[in-house]
Image (cartoon, helix red, strand yellow):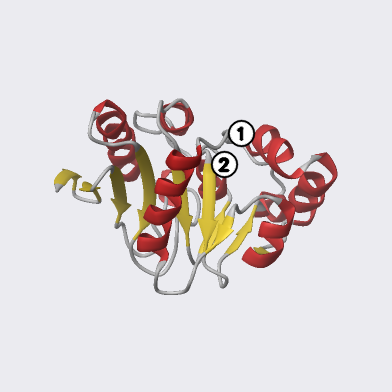
Amino acid sequence: MSQINPVTEMTLDGDVAVITLNSPPVNALSAAVRQGLFEAFKQADADAAAKAIVLVCEGRTFIAGADITEFGSAMADPQLADVQNVIEGASKPVIAAIHGTALGGGLEVALCAHYRVATPSARLGLPEVNLGLLPGAGGTQRLPRVVGVENALAMMTSGRHVPAKEAASLGLVDELVEEGQLRDQAIAFARKVVAEGRPRA
């Protein structure tokens, strides 16, 4: 195990690097979370033993969104876009393992992964419209590429939290996994992706 920082660790499960966030209560995208993700993905991508990378969160939810305590002040580096670039640009398949909610910036991080798996109880969405905002971390660009323009527009203009089963039917989730088995089944999915040589989204 490699402890990246107080909220992030990276472990190798055979040939799969597993990056785990644990930043209660909702794994919001604080400076510590951004720093941990940035460093962990760089290390995982450089590790010759890792053939794929899984991102999973401890606690009750995946990344639930931005850290509102940082609003109104300059954000510490790395910026969220830097983190997203290192995830999306990884040379190995990246799988986001989603439970709870992936909302706003959380979904925008998951969209940078090359594949997404989720538990049936998970919900995904871009609810920024409820605050009078547009998604500001690439959601307006990446979501239409995955679910199509009409579905993406409906999600962004309604702010609806889409259930995982519906998200799977839209192509936003690649595979549903059993409750309580997210980590193990995400790793199994990662190995399947490598074995099949699946194209990335």
Q: Position of residue 130 (x, y in %)?
A: 71, 56
Residue drawn at x 48%, y 72% is: 178
| First of labels 1, 2 by sequence position | 2
- Vertical relation: 1 (above or below) 194: below
Of residues 130 and 145, the one nearer the viewer is: 145
Residue 186 visible in rendering: yes
Q: From the image, tell me which residue sits under label 1.
A: 138
Badge 1 element: loop
Mark 1 or 2: the one toward you: 2
Of residues 27 and 120, the one nearer the viewer is: 120
Crowd tier of the residue under label 2, counting other residues whose Cα lies within 10 Å: few below 14, some 14–19, many 20 or above: many
**In the shown orientation, is residue 107 left or right of residue 68?**
right
Proximity of marks 1 and 2: CB atoms separated by less than 8 Å? yes
What's the amino acid at mark 1? Gly
**In the shown orientation, is residue 39 left or right of residue 196?**
left
**In the shown orientation, is residue 29 left or right of residue 177?**
left
Q: Position of residue 120 (x, y in %)?
A: 57, 70
- Vertical relation: 85 (above or below) 3: above
Q: Quadrant of the C terminus?
A: top right
Q: Position of residue 132 (x, y in %)?
A: 72, 48
Residue 71 visible in rendering: no
Gap between marks 1 and 2 measured at Cα? 9 Å
Q: Which mark is residue 87?
A: none
What's the amino acid at mark 2? Leu
- Looking at this rendering, what residue extends furthest in the front direction? 195
Residue drawn at x 48%, y 48% is: 66
Q: Position of residue 82 (x, y in %)?
A: 43, 26
Badge 2 element: loop
Of residues 72 and 51, the one nearer the viewer is: 51
Residue drawn at x 52%, y 38% is: 114
Residue drawn at x 41%, y 61% is: 185
Q: From the image, tell me which residue sits under label 2.
A: 111
